[in-house]
Image (spheres, coloured by chain):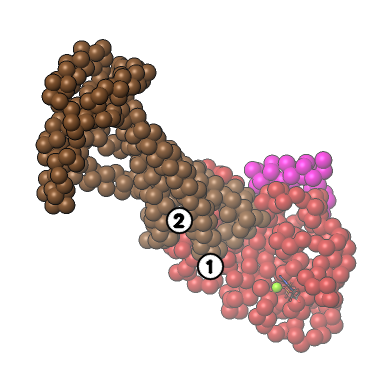
Chain colours: A red, B brown
Amino acid sequence: MAGSSAQSSFRHQALRAGHRYDPSAASRPILVFEDVYKSYRADQPVLRGMSLVIERGEFVFVTGPSGSGKSTLLRLIHRTEQVDDGRILFLGRDVARLPDSAVPALRRNVGVVFQDFRLVPSWSVFDNVAIALEVIGLPQRLVRTRVGEALERVGLAGRGADPARVLSGGEQQRVAVARAIVHEPALILADEPTGNLDPQLAIDVLGLFEDIHETGTTVLFATHDRSLLDVRPRRVVILDEGKATDVPQGLAESDAMLDDDEFEDIDIEAA
Amino acid sequence: MDSNGALVSRGMFGTWRAGRSDWRLQVLSIFSLSVAFVCLAAALLVVTNVEALRDRWSRAGRATVYLKDGAKEGEVAALMQALSQTGGVSRVRRVTSDEARREVVTNDEALAALPVEAFPGSLEVAFDDSIADEDLKTIALKLRALPAVETVETYERWTERLSSLLGGGVTAAACLALIVLAAVISVVGSTMRLLLQRRKIEVEVLRLVGATNGFVRRPFVLEGATQGALGALFAVMLLGLLFLIVRDRFDQQLANLLGITPSFLPWQVALGMVTLGGLLGAMTAFVSLRKLASV
Ligand SMILES: Nc1ncnc2c1ncn2[C@@H]1O[C@H](COP(=O)(O)OP(=O)(O)O)[C@@H](O)[C@H]1O
Ligand SMILES: [Mg+2]
């Protein structure tokens, strides 16, 4: 019955976005990877017994060479991919063992932002953000006020009526961020969200995630842009050889581990 | 062609904004479905009218008594007298060879070349509508035994022929219904495939934000239902138009000869076809979406 109770809890949670998943889970880590294995091809394992603990309210950079599995890691949390072995506990529930029917509810508890924005170009800015609330079935009146608030938080107040396609890259990414936060998820996953933006815009968007973090949301920020890691001392997790290595003191100590040049290169396949 | 082109408005039934700028695809689908439905509707129209014809004739209560060439006037007059006094007979009319010839031969030269003897004289006997089949048969049997009578046509065989024609029509309609089924499945199925391709980004975004399968599929199913129903509706309307044209040309003589005027599909059948189209469209869309798009 564990599966079905997880399912109903997620449903419950989905209707009251932003609330605690389970009172007793408040003190527990929000996200736990236990000995996770994942490979797309048998001869090329991506994650090999990876373990990682992320506490509630943390801001964590996930970094590592291109192809090290940063995107894979995030997709596993979001159940776009399935683990081969091991456990991923999100709010105390094993994501890997959720029935398919509970996956939508899981996703409503997580916000995701990608390098390529993933907006519907023909929809208005408003509609692109509102969809995250409409899938929950929120009344239109509430949708309007909450989308308005989210757009204000990302600095796009008044742009709701514009079609998404006319916005600049930086603005489109802000719309994507608004969509990721509008339902007040407990966790935000960002997969190279600054990858398509020039350096100044990248810093701006990072600032946006930091603001969101300030409000108590846990942020998992995958990037291979080293300059972002230097902006502020943050927890950094390096993915390499299929394992996660925690570097809590910031980047200074981790320099030794980032010895390969490849890490600095812009990776076209990073998305 | 933006939000005002949306097939389903936002919020309605909790659907997302699908259907904008896909109207060409929808029209094409509706047109293809109409073609299939018009065949079915036409077959049903034929069945409807043949059935009416058979019903009319099965209680037509008339007979033609063909007289022998050598029948004497006295015998014929006595026969007419006797017939008109028989219970159930409402009218007796004499049709001479000449009259028969004139009725058939108007301006056809080949027919005109035939001798008068080719057109036998006859008595047209009309019965009351209430006459029982058995009584009619008995009367016909007695008449056949008379020396002046060549043969008696009670049109029973025509009723039988119409019945068998009707059976054929029903079979044809059933086959066409199967073809319509196949057409709806293939047309709506491939339209759904194309629509899904066009809305790839939309569907991806929906998955991203945690839309359930039902939420993603709903607009597609509504569109499938709309396409099916409109396809059937247009077919019925088109057939109705053609029917009006044909009926205008249907002259009174022909109507008198057949004993009926052509009638259109009963409204229940027309409504049933539209409902069937809608249901089939919705089901096909649902099944296609199940196959093509799940979590
Ligand atoms: N859908 C996929 N099918 C097959 N291989 C994949 C797929 N996604 C990622 N990979 C492979 O898995 C490895 C890790 O990819 P990814 O998680 O995208 O790394 P990163 O985001 O760190 O660059 C790479 O070698 C990549 O080629
Ligand atoms: Mg990546």
Amino acid type shown at disc 1: Gln
Q: Nearer the viewer, residue A70 or A85?
A: A85
Chain under callout 1:
A
- Quarter-wise, where is residue A264 in the image? bottom right
Residue placed at 79% from the left, 68% from the top? A235
Where does residue B78 sit, x and y in percent of width and height?
17, 17
Q: Is residue A13 magenta?
A: yes
For the C terminus of chain B, give its image quadrant.
Answer: bottom right
Where does residue B142 sit, x and y in percent of width and height?
31, 19
- Ligand 1 sits in quadrant: bottom right
User: In the rendered image, which residue does mark 2 sit on?
Assistant: B19
Amino acid type shown at disc 2: Gly
Question: Vertically, is B43 above or below A232?
Answer: above
Q: Nearer the viewer, residue A87 or B189?
A: B189
User: In the rendered image, which residue does mark 1 sit on?
Assistant: A172
Residue placed at 88% from the left, 67% from the top? A49
Q: Nearer the viewer, residue A81 or B286?
A: B286
